[in-house]
Image (spheres, rainbow, N blue to C red):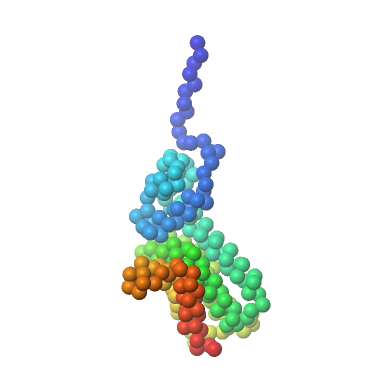
């Protein structure tokens, strides 16, 4: 008599394949729209079309998937910065900073969830907020740092404007228009994610911020 093989209990096998990049893309939108507390792993799993048990196998907990999702998006921003620095290597001073600001606005239009996640955490001063500052925001803000805007390395010296104000103005201007897209459409009948509106917004922000340095 042949004995039936008993099914093993426990977690799914380790080599079970998932599209991790896609899952993290779904997760970052959930965290952006609902905040950390409002996002639910089972909703992410449902949208990714995977089981809750498989989700639990590949991610330790909600904090783990949050960090991995933020890092994946942060890596996209870092890649954009490196790319921008590459084709702007012949630009110096105000021209370089204008060009970088334009590229950051384009990135913000492509990924409004980036700043939504940051906004959620900065408003509540969580440990996740500290992690964001150390791992995501500090490298970004360094671009506008006084050490990186001196005449010695070809960048403009914004004398008299504190870095906290300058970086907040540029980064805020780059993101708010897209984060408040519903308001823009309801109040002004403007569609921020229309390519023409993205380009117009970039032109306006650059003209307003850097007008005094012409």
Identify the residue at image location x=55%, y=60%.
75
Which residue is the extreme one toward the top? 1
In the rendered image, residue 101, in percent from the top left (x then y), is placed at 53, 75
107 vs 192, nearest the viewer: 192
Q: Is residue 162 in view from this perspective?
A: no
Locate residue 76: give its quadrant: bottom right
Q: Is residue 59 in view from this perspective?
A: yes
In the rendered image, residue 132, in percent from the top left (x then y), is placed at 47, 63
Identify the residue at image location x=63%, y=74%.
88
**Tally of numbered discs:** 0
In the rendered image, residue 67, in percent from the top left (x then y), is placed at 47, 55
Q: Is residue 203 above or below residue 193?
A: below
187 vs 110, nearest the viewer: 187
Which residue is the extreme one toward the right? 90
In the rendered image, residue 129, in percent from the top left (x then y), is placed at 43, 63
106 vs 97, nearest the viewer: 106
Locate residue 56: give its quadrant: top left
Quadrant showing the C terminus:
bottom right
């Amino acid at each position: 008599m042949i004995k039936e093989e008993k099914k093993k209990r426990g977690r799914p096998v380790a080599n079970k394949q998932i599209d991790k990049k896609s899952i993290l893309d779904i997760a970052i939108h959930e965290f952006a729209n609902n905040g950390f507390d409002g996002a639910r792993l089972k909703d992410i799993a449902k949208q990714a079309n995977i089981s809750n048990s498989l989700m639990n196998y590949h991610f330790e907990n909600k904090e783990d998937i949050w960090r991995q999702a933020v890092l994946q998006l942060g890596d996209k921003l870092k890649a954009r910065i490196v790319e921008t620095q590459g084709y702007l290597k012949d630009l110096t001073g105000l021209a370089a900073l204008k060009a970088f600001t334009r590229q950051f606005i384009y990135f913000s239009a492509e990924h409004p969830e980036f700043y939504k996640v940051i906004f959620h955490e900065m408003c509540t001063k969580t440990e996740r907020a500290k992690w964001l500052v150390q791992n995501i925001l500090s490298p970004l803000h360094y671009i506008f740092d006084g050490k990186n805007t001196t005449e010695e390395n070809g960048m403009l010296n914004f004398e008299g404007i504190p870095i906290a104000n300058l970086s907040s103005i540029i980064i805020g201007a780059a993101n708010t228009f897209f984060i408040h897209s519903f308001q823009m459409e309801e109040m002004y009948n403007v569609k921020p994610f229309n390519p023409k509106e993205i380009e117009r917004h970039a032109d306006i922000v650059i003209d307003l911020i850097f007008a005094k340095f012409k």
